Amino acid sequence: MSSPGASQALTRPDLRNAVVSEWDVNGEKANFIADQVGKRIDVDFAAGKIKRIPREAFTKDANTLNRGPGGSYSTSTWGDENLEFFTKEQGHEIPVDEEMASQCKIYYDAELAAARICMSKVMRKHEIDVAAAVMNTTTFAGASLTTAGSVNWTTTPATAVPIDDVTSAALKVRQNCGRVANSIILSYTLWKKLIAVTQIVNRINGGATSQLPAAVQMAAVAQLFDLERIIIAKGIKDTAAEGQTFTAGDIWAADKAMVCYINPAANLQDINLCNVYNWEGSGGSWDWTFETYRFEKNRTDTVRARRNVGIKVEYPECGHLITGLG
């Protein structure tokens, strides 16, 4: 039942287009890595269950594939595992008072500003949720899925051995899922500490130490790690309570690094570290649904941004979490 005095919500594609064209969405997205880490899977239902293809389906050695005349072929089964997915609506809305909008209009469009903030909040919450799933020490527990760094990269850069730590983690990934690790995920804070580690600087500079750590290039570090890419999370969040002084904190943990295999394709027919399920059945959209509704009693137009997504670490075996780095 609608709220007293509220009109029916109107879908506003014009508002979405204005936000995308007039605001540096890509600049905001550059701070976030959720879409690089979690592969988007479009689903037809808000939640469901299908047969899960286990890692053993790809790696199990058949007794024999040879078939003689009149013989049978080697066979295998799907196994008994099910893959369950779910989505939840994520959205935020801001009321725009007509009087306030009138006062601001010579400086900025209050409705558009509200839409930008709504979208930013939903994007940031999605980033927080993916980070929480991928850096989860409960999901990634036990010697095969997590280890502590040999020496703390942040507090002991002179003797830390990140190349050794990452190499060891990458070998665990290959042993666990049969794929070679291709990525490392770390926060911007940890990245800045990493490029000051003596082992990294010396290997890149050929033993010289005069070069500034800031000159260490991402591609060179990726090559040292024998990984295709380094994914650096730059997003921050205000960790202070409502009404308190702004306090910035990393969204992705500054004391952990995830070495992993991220499937370049988005599908359910192969293994992958993390999937993000997207459902558009309730009118939401991956590319954002913007809506407005009017409260005439208060002379306000409320702006809303929303979409339906679900996050799941599908194959923990595709990752190895290194802890104790900050």
Image: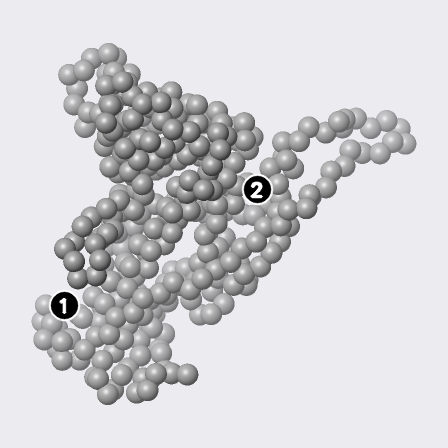
Helix, strand or loop at mark 2: loop
Count every numbered label the image shows and give the total: 2
Residue 229 appears in view: no
For label 1, the crowd category at 10 Å Cα-Cα, with few meaning under 14, some 14 to 19 and many 20 or more, is: few
Residue under the image location 33 percent in, 56 percent down: 125
Q: Is residue 16 left or right of residue 72?
A: left
Disc 1 marks which amino acid? Tyr
Of the pair 27 and 83, the residue shown nearer to us: 83
Residue under the image location 38 percent in, 28 percent down: 148
Rendering coords of residue 66 (x, y %) = 79, 26
Disc 2 marks which amino acid? Asp
Quadrant containing the N terminus is bottom left
Quadrant containing the C terminus is top left
Please tell me whether residue 295 is drawn above or below residue 123 in the rendered image.
below
Q: Name the residue carrying label 2.
A: 270
In which quadrant of the rendered view does residue 191 lie? top left
In which quadrant of the rendered view does residue 117 lie? bottom left
Most extreme residue toward the top is 207
Residue under the image location 22 percent in, 25 percent down: 196
Q: Name the residue carrying label 1.
A: 108
Q: Is residue 282 left or right of residue 241?
A: right
Mark 1 or 2, closer to the camera: 2
Indicate which disc, 1 or 2, sits on the residue closer to the N terminus: 1
Helix, strand or loop at mark 1: loop
Please tell me whether residue 295 is drawn above or below residue 277 in the rendered image.
below
